[in-house]
Image: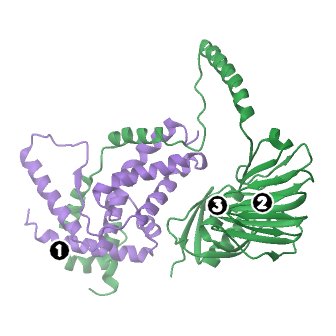
Chain colours: A purple, B green
Amino acid sequence: MSVCNQNVFKKIYFRWNEPLQRFLQSKGMERSKTADLVQETFLRLWKNCAKVLPEQSKSFLFTAANNLLIDAYRQSQSRIKLQPRLPKTVSLEDGQYQFEMKEFQAHLEAAIDSMTPASKEVFLLHRFNEMSYQDIATSLGLSIKAVEKRMTKALKHLAVQIQDWGSK
Amino acid sequence: MQQEENILLSKWLAGTILPDELRALEQEVDLDRLAQVLEQQKQFELAVEPVETMWTDFELKIATTPSVEKKMPPQLPIFKWIIGLLLLLAFAIGAFYYLQQQPEKLITPPAAVATKIFAEGTKVALSPGSALAFKTEDWKKERTIQLQGQAFFDVTKGLPMFIHTEGGTIAVLGTQFDVWEMGAWMRVQCFEGKVKVSVGSEAKILGAMEMVFVNKNSLSLVSAFRETKPDWQRQERVFQKIPINLVLKDLERFYAIEFDASAVRLNDAFSGVLPTQDLDRALTYLTRSMNWQYEQQNKLIYLKPTAE
């Protein structure tokens, strides 16, 4: 089946849209711009659909997104925004739980945003994009050791921040 | 923190930490609390735009963007076929009368060549990604051809022949010559007989084994060459100080490839000889002399500067 087939294309679109949005955010792209860039990325795939096999579409998409990101300027000051994963296991009426979750989310966002851009990037890719150290090393052109160093720096920063969140 | 401990936390997270190292780390960091927070963090994800809404926008976008592959027509019921055939017939009759007024066209796709032999014997070999347009019924008065790209002409003696390009006009009687045009840039090589190249009010006459360049409405001095065939028929491209963007377009024409040059600067000119039948060698030579690297994904070639 060709990528030019609209059903095949739609499947690819739905499979990789969210991972691409998160990938670009992790790499420091401002959230308001990621959607446009993701559309542009898929448009590139559409224009080249005859040249790309379905199983190659993932690497095509991520390479294209990376290139577009380099074209666009890199926003190291962008702030992240988290959302609770669905489905929720706890009932929505549980006000106390909701409140704690909201508070935790705000703390976590602030902690991540105050990391150095290099460790923030690695932390986000590893924890929110399901990328292994090896994947991150390849994607950023670093050694695994360097990725581990940045991850350690991120965790250390997080451990320090936690102390200020107040004991539970 | 000491050097050795630099990656202990990431080893801890990956589960590859050694017992000794763990004991040392526990002295420094509240690991239980950190593990708890990381566990809780898993309940969150980076906020994204809803994919359904994005898809609706995207469908609108691709409705106006043709993909490279042509869509298969959907199966139609038989009566629609009949109406379709009638319409096609009406269209064909109309088109027949219309086309008699229109010039004939010969177009080569990238990586393909074609030869056109005219009734009076003139032969035109068209290089990849090029186009000819002509009206043979007018040839009793005057032989006129429009050219885009590059072609080698072997013109039979007779009425004057005029080759029109964006950069200028070439007038000939009976001769062999090659025209290579890329917009405002053009090279004309005369292999036999005489040709006249005109650009605006300027004109130069070329004898056998002489060539001239046109660049932005001005003609270069006439110079001599020794080859007996144009470069593209010798399976190579000879570039002399050609702006690099034109060189890339030319390679796209010969290899049916597409460059993504968004990561490199296209200000420089390129001089050199590139093969037309060996893509790897052409790309290696080109990128090396421009200090670039390339990455190939099927027909798409990404260019990027060489890392320091």
User: Given the image, what chain letter belongs to the residue carrying mark 2?
Assistant: B
**Distance (Cα) linking label 3 and label 1:** 63 Å
Horizontal relation, residue B87 to residue B266: left or right: right
| Mark 1 nearby-residue class (10 Å; few <14, some 14–19, many ≥20) | some
Question: What percent of the width, then of the height, locates residue A149?
Answer: 35, 77
Direction bottom: furthest residue: B2
**Distance (Cα) linking label 2 and label 3:** 15 Å
Horizontal relation, residue B149 to residue B178: left or right: left
The residue identified by callout 2 is: B170
The residue depicted at 71 percent of the width and 37 percent of the height is B102
Which quadrant of the view contains residue A81?
A: bottom left
Does any portion of residue B289 appear in the rendered image? Answer: yes
Of the 4 image quadrants, the one containing the N terminus of chain A is top right
Q: Dot 3 lies on which element?
A: loop
User: Given the image, what chain letter belongs to the residue carrying mark 1?
Assistant: A
Question: What percent of the width, then of the height, locates residue B78?
Answer: 62, 13
Q: On residue A160, which mark appears?
A: 1
